[in-house]
Amino acid sequence: MKIDRRQFMHGALAASCAPAVGAQAAGTSPVYIGDMHSHLFFFGMGVSPEKRPLGATMAAGNATLVAWSLVGDVPWLRITGQGIKQKGQPQRGEAIAWFENDLTRIKAHLDSQGLKLALNPDDIDAALRGEPRVVLTVEGATFVEDDPAPLAHAYELGVRSVQLVHYIENPLADFQTERPQYGGMTDLGRTVIEECNRLGMLVDLAHCTDIVVRAALEVSTQPVMWSHSSVTRTRQPNWKMPVWQARQLPLDTAKLIASKGGVVGLWPMRSDVGPSPEAYGERAWELGEWLGVDHVGFGTDMNAISRPAISSYADLQKVVRLWQAAGFPDESIRKIALGNFARILKQAMSARAA
């Protein structure tokens, strides 16, 4: 797994002349793409489903397992010069109403594209064979309010992964970009993780503080994911830092996630990973060196990052070609590209209690 920088850049040069996505060498099978975190209806990025339909976006890069994140706290957010901030607090019942309305809109778009949901392990196997599936996820479990019961309702509606926190206060846990109010995870947060395990929903710890991540790993009986951001080995992030630094995960904590079988997704924030698919590819491979090739995936945060290094699934296929041209192992490439995300999602689904 060790990167040779010259080898990587030589591979990048060679890959610039490589065939477009879909063109495969004789005797080889396509490398399919998985994305642990993406958006289409997130506000402020100028993207509409009419201009960028998900089906075409996935097909352009052979993406077959894409997590579409419903942002559970959008009505209570605003974009500021210091990043996304809370502008209000939902009244009782408002968050679940928002969740249900936005989910209806998401499903209507998926239906218009002929895209199927990933609902069970068989669907994950289909994605691994090249049949596109979309995973419904929720970013910020605001709809839970003070009772985990709505999680079962979300499951019945097709949600298969829940991210505990996002950008507004909720009664589950602290998040990275504001001053902690609980000093970690609450009892309700622990109960929510237990309920996700019982239902067969993958727990996503992105945006959680370091203390919360460690507490969650003690509670969860299944591997978890950190769907998007990056890992730092030089600092301990905190809420006073610039947003992209505050959102990083300390290396020792990332290793704990990996030690429990989990996966960390790398985002394409330019200020963090660099300006290009080449820079993203080098950083993702390096992350595999740090955590092990079984514990890294793509987490693009697509349509929620301004001017990202990776702006399409075709860009991720370019990363794959860079790795191939550099001579990196095919098995490792396929794990990072899709296999690791598929594995932990399938494991979470398979653990559903009878």
Image (spheres, rainbow, N blue to C red):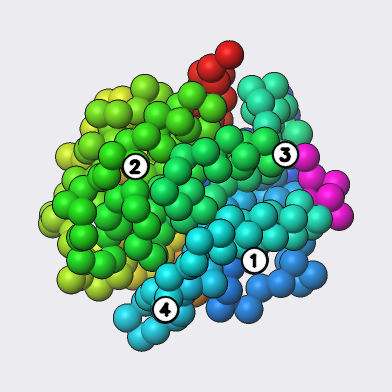
**Residue receiving disc 1:** 41
The span from disc 2 to disc 3 (Cα, nearest Å) is 27 Å
* Image depth: mark 1 or mark 4 in front: 4
Q: Do the residues labelled 4 and 3 touch (CB within 8 Å)?
A: no
**Residue receiving disc 4:** 87
Graded by Cα atoms within 10 Å as few (under 14), some (14 to 19) or many (20 or more), the crowding at tag 4 reads few
Q: Do the residues labelled 2 and 1 touch (CB within 8 Å)?
A: no
The residue located at (39%, 84%) in the rendering is: 80
* Image depth: mark 4 or mark 3 in front: 4
Q: Which of marks 2 and 3 is nearer the N terminus?
A: 3
The residue located at (58%, 74%) in the rendering is: 43
**Residue receiving disc 2:** 189
Indicate the quadrant where residue 352 lies. top right
Q: Establish if 102 lies above or below 217.
A: below
Q: Which of marks 4 and 2 is nearer the N terminus?
A: 4
Q: Earlier in the sequence, mark 3 or mark 1?
A: 1
Numbered range of the magenta stretch: 110-116
The span from disc 2 to disc 1 (Cα, nearest Å) is 27 Å
Graded by Cα atoms within 10 Å as few (under 14), some (14 to 19) or many (20 or more), the crowding at tag 2 reads many
Q: What residue type is labelled 3?
A: Leu
Total number of numbered discs in the rendering: 4
**Residue receiving disc 3:** 117
Q: Is residue 228 magenta?
A: no
The span from disc 1 to disc 4 (Cα, nearest Å) is 19 Å
Q: What residue type is labelled 4?
A: Lys
Q: Which of marks 4 and 3 is nearer the N terminus?
A: 4
- Left/right placement of residue 155 relative to residue 104 reads left
For residue 57, say whether it is visible: no
Q: What residue type is labelled 1?
A: Phe
Q: Tell me the element at label 4.
A: loop
- Left/right placement of residue 53 relative to residue 232 reads right
Q: Establish if 27 lies above or below 73.
A: above
